[in-house]
Image (tube, helix red, strand yellow):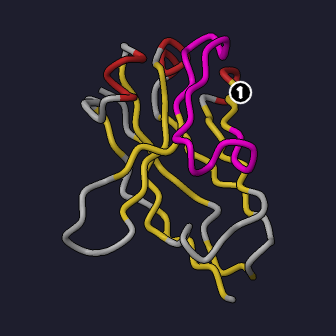
Amino acid sequence: QVQLVESGGGLVQAGGSLRLSCAASRRTASLYAMGWFRRQAPGKGREFVAAISWSGDNEHYVDSVKGRFTISRENAKNTVYLQMNSLKPEDPAVYYCAADLYFSSVVAGRSGSWGQGTQVTVSS
């Protein structure tokens, strides 16, 4: 497992942009697939948003963010990013970073490691 720390959340107007970052604690985190999930209301489950393979060659997005969000990573910094553009009123949530050795596990929400989350708020 790795420890994950998210940052970059905040308040933004609808149509605006934010970039979330997730820093991993281990050098070997570069071998992990990583992803982003969000929880839009207390008591609701976490929704898959995006995932990226350890090499960066494979990405996967939920349909609702395709064309607006981009996941990327810098293995030299053990960091994954989520660039969020054209934010909509339905995007506010606590966004969580996830990591696992297996890309499929990240996509399925079965990651072994999770961050504490960062709040994203969108004003209309």
Q: Which residue is mark 1?
A: 74
Q: Magenta segment: does it hold 119?
A: no
Q: Name the residue nearer the viewer: 109 or 88.
A: 88
Report the span colored magenta: 51-70
Q: Is 43 above or below relative to 19?
A: below
Q: Name the residue nearer the viewer: 86 or 116.
A: 86
Q: Where, quadrant-wise, is the C terminus in this rendering?
A: bottom right
Residue drawn at x 31%, y 22% is: 105
Question: Residue 53 occupies which quadrant of the picture?
Answer: top right
Question: Residue 13 occupies which quadrant of the picture?
Answer: bottom right
Residue drawn at x 58%, y 59% is: 7
**Residue 106 point in image, percent of width and height:** 37, 28
Query: Is 69 left, or right, of 2 in this rendering?
Result: right
Return the residue found at the far bottom: 124
Q: Name the residue nearer the viewer: 55 or 6.
A: 55
Q: Is 7 above or below relative to 37?
A: below
Query: Is 78 left, or right, of 33 in this rendering?
Result: right
Residue drawn at x 56%, y 27% is: 60
At mark 1, the secondary structure is strand
Question: Residue 76 occupies which quadrant of the picture?
Answer: top right
**Residue 48 point in image, percent of width and height:** 41, 43
Q: Where, quadrant-wise, is the N terminus in this rendering?
A: top left
Residue type marked 1: Glu
Q: Residues within 10 Å of mark 1 (few under 14, many from 20)?
A: some
**Residue 67 point in image, percent of width and height:** 75, 43
Query: Is 104 left, or right, of 66 in this rendering?
Result: left
Q: Is 32 above or below relative to 62?
A: above
Q: Is 119 above or below relative to 79?
A: below
